[in-house]
Amino acid sequence: MKKLFAILAIFGMMSVGLSSVLLAQDATPAEETEQVAVTPVETTQATVDETSGGFHQALKVKFIEGGAGFMSTIAICLILGLAFCLERIIYLSLADVDPDAFLNKVGDTLERGDVEAAKDIARNTRGPVASIVYQGLLRLDQGPDAVERSIVSYGGVQSGLLERNLSWITLFIAVAPSLGFLGTVVGMVMAFDDIQRAGDMSPTIVAGGMKVALITTVGGLIVAIILQIIYNYILSKMEGILNKMEDASITFLDQVIKYNVKYKNL
């Protein structure tokens, strides 16, 4: 189910992004044709209308000015990064279960000596804490030392599951600004080519080329900042779950020791 949510999120974001790109590309030839045919007064009016088009219109214009090649790759980094972030947030939200109520139920059943009921409670409860407790209950007859080793070993497995796909998020955080810098370098090279062809160091030529070149850097940095903020939120949520796992493990070991003292005389 979590993978289904992530896939739906990817397709939804990509469809929105592609539709915006297609609309932008369709609008570009019409705008260029109008700029050739209109008078200076009409050109001024078109500029005012474009400026008042809102954030979406301004974003579309900057996307076109930055170049479809580099800006599309940066947009793909944003879409895929957000998809992985969404998948991790859903997974961690489902894994973040209140361990106190769960451990109280397990402790009550162990107090009565009903190990099978404790296993059923752990089996029917989601989250890494319940999984660790269930593995410990499976080795309850082997003594507290075996339970402790099982908790430590399976706790490492659950920690790895919590950290899964985080490397992909860090990859997109690093790749997005790198693509922006690459687009800037390519744009500056193209600007110098324009200067060489014109044979003149005109401020208009230099400013236009530099503007287009720097847009890709701005886009890459914005994507990296967005993903970095979400990534830090995921890390804080994951650290909270790991702390709950450690506290729950200590509490469960205390319950196991009480059970063995009461029923096993160990």
Image (cartoon, helix red, strand yellow):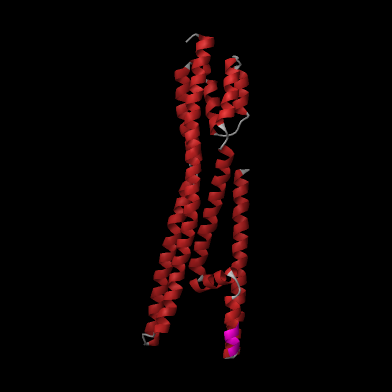
Whether residue 154 is visible, yes or no, is no
Q: Is residue 257 magenta?
A: no
Q: Which residues are magenta?
A: 41-45
Task: Look at the magenta stretch and give its main secondary structure.
Answer: helix
- Quarter of the rendering occupied by the N terminus: top right
Residue 55: quarter of image:
bottom right
Residue 169 x, y percent position in the rendering: 48, 51
The residue shown at (54%, 33%) is 128
Q: Position of residue 250 (x, y in %)?
A: 47, 25
Q: Nearer the viewer, residue 20 or 92?
A: 92
Indicate whether 149 appears above or below 21.
above
Residue at the spot 50% in from the left edge and 51% down from the top edge: 230
Residue drawn at point x = 49 percent, y = 32 percent: 245
Q: Can residue 108 be seen from the camera position used here?
A: yes
x and y percentages locating residue 100 in the rendered image: 56, 29
Q: In this view of the protein, which residue sits in the foreground, 257 or 135?
A: 257
Vertical order, 54 against 262 (above or below): below
Please report the residue visible at 59 percent of the width from the left and 59 percent of the height from the top.
Answer: 14
Left or right: where 203 falls relative to 37: left
Using residue 95 as the reference point, say whether residue 242 is left or right of it. Answer: left
